[in-house]
Every structure is written in structure tokens, then in C-alpha cells.
Amino acid sequence: MDNITEMLKGVLEGCVLEIISRGETYGYEITQQLRELGFTDVVEGTVYTITMRLEKNNLVNITKKASTKGPPRKFYTLNAAGQEHLQTFWRKWEFVSSKITELKNKEEGEI
């Protein structure tokens, strides 16, 4: 889908949290998983900014591991606060998503 970056800004953090919740991962892997899902406009810099914010807000645990290419990589796992934040994200997403669907499906004049 063309140029959905602006719309995605509000939900990418939740998507990144969901990816991290599924197992230890690092920035490039997160970017690749998002691209495989069809979010082809997402760049590593965007994911880096999100992971830094997650780190600053103490939502993830970090382990540094040696890399065959360059400096050590930061691997992320979700901690308890991150799990709670992710659950809140999904509750909000379900609410917004259901209201958008409701709006879309209403006949003209019912709003």
C-alpha cells in the first residue's frame, strides 16, 4: 500500500512490541519481519527510534551479543512492563478498529 507511513506512526510501536514479545530479537530482524508483513516503507532508522524509546521507558530487557559483522548487537525481550504496555496497545487497537469498522459499515444518514 502506497505511502501509509503517517498512518503507521501511531501503531508501529505496538507492532514492534508484538514482534519482541514472540522471542528475543534485534533491530534488523524486527525491520525484516515488518517488511515481510507488507510494511515495506519501514526503515531501520524508524525501528531504531522505537527500540530506543522502548529502552528509555523500561519496557524491554537488553542483552548485548557479539556480531560477526561490526559491533555487538542489542537483543530485545519484553519485560513485565512491556507485556502490560502491549496488552494496553491491543485493547486500544481493538476499540479503535471496531469503531472504524462500525463507521465504515453504517449507512449514510445513520451517523
Image: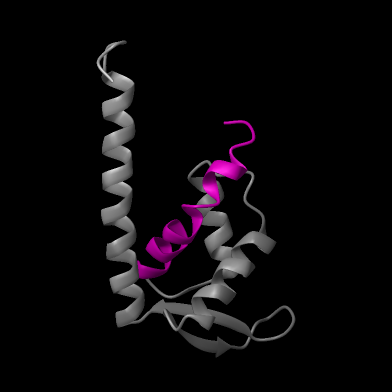
What residue range appears in magenta? 1-22
Q: Main secondary structure of the magenta part?
A: helix
Screen quadrant of the C terminus: top left
Q: Residue at x 35, y 82 (%)?
A: 79
Closer to us: 39 or 87: 87
Is 42 on the left or on the right of 94, as rendered?
Answer: right
Residue 39 rendering spot, x and y as whole percentages: 55, 44
Q: Nearer the viewer, residue 111 or 101?
A: 111
Instruction: Give the residue at x 65% y 86%.
Output: 72
* Quadrant including the N terminus: top right
Q: Residue at x 64, y 60 (%)?
A: 46
Would residue 7 be counted in the magenta stretch? yes
Q: Residue at x 50, y 88 (%)?
A: 63
Could you say where residue 24 lies in the image, as x and y percent from the top left? 43, 75
Q: How is the image coloured?
A: one colour
User: Does the magenta-highlighted stretch encompass residue 12?
Assistant: yes
Q: Quadrant of residue 104?
A: top left
